[in-house]
Each structure stands twice: as C-alpha cells, then as structure tokens.
Amino acid sequence: MDKIYTYSLLKYKHSSILGECLNIGLLVYFNDNKKLKFIYPDSLSRIKNSYVGVNEKTIRNYLKQIDYKATLFNKKFDSLISEIIGYNFKEFIDNYILPPDGSSLQFENSVVNFQRNYSEDKIVEQLKHLYHFESQESRVDKEYEIGKTFYGYIKNRVNENYFYRDYEIKNPTGAKFKFKYAWQNGSLNLVKPLNFDLSEQRHIARKAHENFGLFVDLEPVAEQKDLKYDLLVIKPTKKSLYKEYDHSIKLLERVERTNIIEESEIKKYSENLIKTLSNKK
C-alpha cells in the first residue's frame, strides 16, 4: 500500500480587509512513521518587505510555538492522536496546534497526497519548492542592510544629542510607528529604509501605497513637529519592474515632506548629514 502524507499551508494575513496573504509555513504529517514536521523560513524579510508595521517578534513567537508543539507531539504520539489526525488533520491543527482565533497566522485546509517512492526529506524539499519558501524573495533583509550601511557612514561622526535610533512617532489616535533613525536640524528628519527590489509589480505597488497611507495618516503630527521623511530606497534588479518602481516613487513624492535617497546616493546624503550636525553644539 502506498504511503501517504498530509499537509496544511500556514499563511500570514496582514489585513482581513485587503484579503491578501503570504505563505509562511507548512505542517506536514507522515502517516507511515507517525511524525509531524513544521517547515518555516529563517528570515521574515519577505513579509517585512511587503507590509508596513509587521510585528516580527510576535510572528516569530507563533512560529516557535508551532514548532515546539509539533516536536512535543512527535515525542508522545499514541493511537488516539493518530486517529484524530487521520480523521481530520485541519481539526487536529485547530484544536492542538494553532486555534483559528482571528490572528494574522492561519492554517489552510489540509491536502492529502501519496508519498510514492520519495523519502520524507525529498517530499519536504518538493513542498518548499512548490510554495517558494526559499526563492520568493532574497533571504537577506535588504532594508536592514541598507540601514546598516547608512549608519556605518555616520557612526561616531555625529553629535548624538541630535541623532536618534528607533525613533517612535504616534498618529492622532495614539498608534505607534517606529522609524529606524532620526536626526534633528530645525525639522525632525525621519530616516526609513525601503526595499523595492521585490519579485512582482503588486508587491512594489503595495509597499508604496502603505507608506503613502502612513505619511498621510501622520500629516497632522508632521505639521506640528515639522517632520521630514528621508527614504533610503533600493531599486528593483528586474528591468521589467522599473516602470512600477518609478510610479511608486512619484506617488511617495506627492507627500511634500519626502526626500528620496537611492542606494547610490546614501554616502553623499550621510556626508551632508555629518556636516550639518557637526555645527551643532
């Protein structure tokens, strides 16, 4: 008799209103040896690059808890658990792994397939390839890297009384938004890395729309505190995405307080910042 395996795809849903979601994990059950395996990426850069305001710490905690529960069940499998999984894998997940409580992480309905002559490791690799866990976006967090490059230029070269890290701003209702860096020169300049080197037009458009919406939301605060937005942007590597990138930049430039700094201009921008703050006492 052919061996079977069952799996359920874990999706990240940033907004129930948008209805969009990204694949973030897979829970696989191999019926023959009664083992669960949870697959998830080491990096959350794809989600962070696609949405504004991602709570990375909460997502990582969820993923670790799911992995822990799967490992725990592997140590204490019995006939009852096997029977529950065999009857309804999604129900098992809802009751014992991750309840469908309206959080941003939700498992999809399960899929049953034949293992044939493939090993479990081969099945896992096929599933990872099928759902693009390794290739959907670069595993490098490019926004972190470009922020690191910028900070490397100005570290120990500016007056720290006028330069801030992880600067927090509240919108009119009190919701908090964190900017990686900020510096004071009459106006308060908020420095935000933005990676547009993404895989599809819609991802670039979504990132531009979300940030445009953020700046519009902060407009009353920006006027009160004289905020400026210095955006360190990374262009797409695919030429086919240049048109969408240009459109997104024009959209962001509609906010009068934005200053677009492309990757090749970061050093010059940093030198001007150092020069400006060096005159501060």
Image (spheres, rainbow, N blue to C red):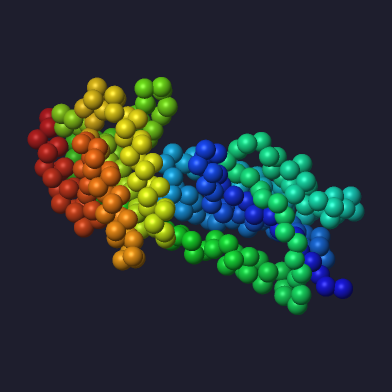
Percent of width and height locating residue 14:
51, 42
Please state the total of marks drawn on the protein image.
0
- The quadrant of the rendering that contains the N terminus is bottom right
User: Could you say which is closer to the camera, residue 180 or residue 46?
Assistant: 46
Percent of width and height locating residue 160:
23, 35
Quarter of the image for residue 41 reads bottom right
In the rendered image, the vertical position of residue 112 relative to residue 211, given as above or below: below
At 21% from the left edge and 58% from the top edge, which residue is drawn? 264
- Is 219 displayed left or right of 18 in the figure? left
Q: Is residue 148 visible?
A: no
- Is 265 displayed left or right of 140 in the figure? left
At 14% from the left edge and 37% from the top edge, which residue is drawn? 277
At 19% from the left edge and 54% from the top edge, which residue is drawn? 265
In the rendered image, the vertical position of residue 53 relative to residue 248, given as above or below: above
- Is 133 displayed left or right of 200 in the figure? right
Percent of width and height locating residue 100:
68, 39
Residue at the right extreme, as displayed: 79
Q: Is residue 256 visible?
A: yes
In the rendered image, the vertical position of residue 68 relative to residue 133, given as above or below: above
At 29% from the left edge and 39% from the top edge, which residue is drawn? 181
User: Could you say which is closer to the camera, residue 235 or residue 249?
Assistant: 249
User: Could you say which is closer to the camera, residue 58 or residue 123?
Assistant: 123
Residue at the bottom extreme, as displayed: 117
- The quadrant of the rendering that contains the C terminus is top left
Percent of width and height locating residue 7:
71, 58
In the rendered image, the vertical position of residue 228 relative to residue 198, given as above or below: above
Residue at the left extreme, as displayed: 279
User: Could you say which is closer to the camera, residue 136 or residue 182?
Assistant: 136
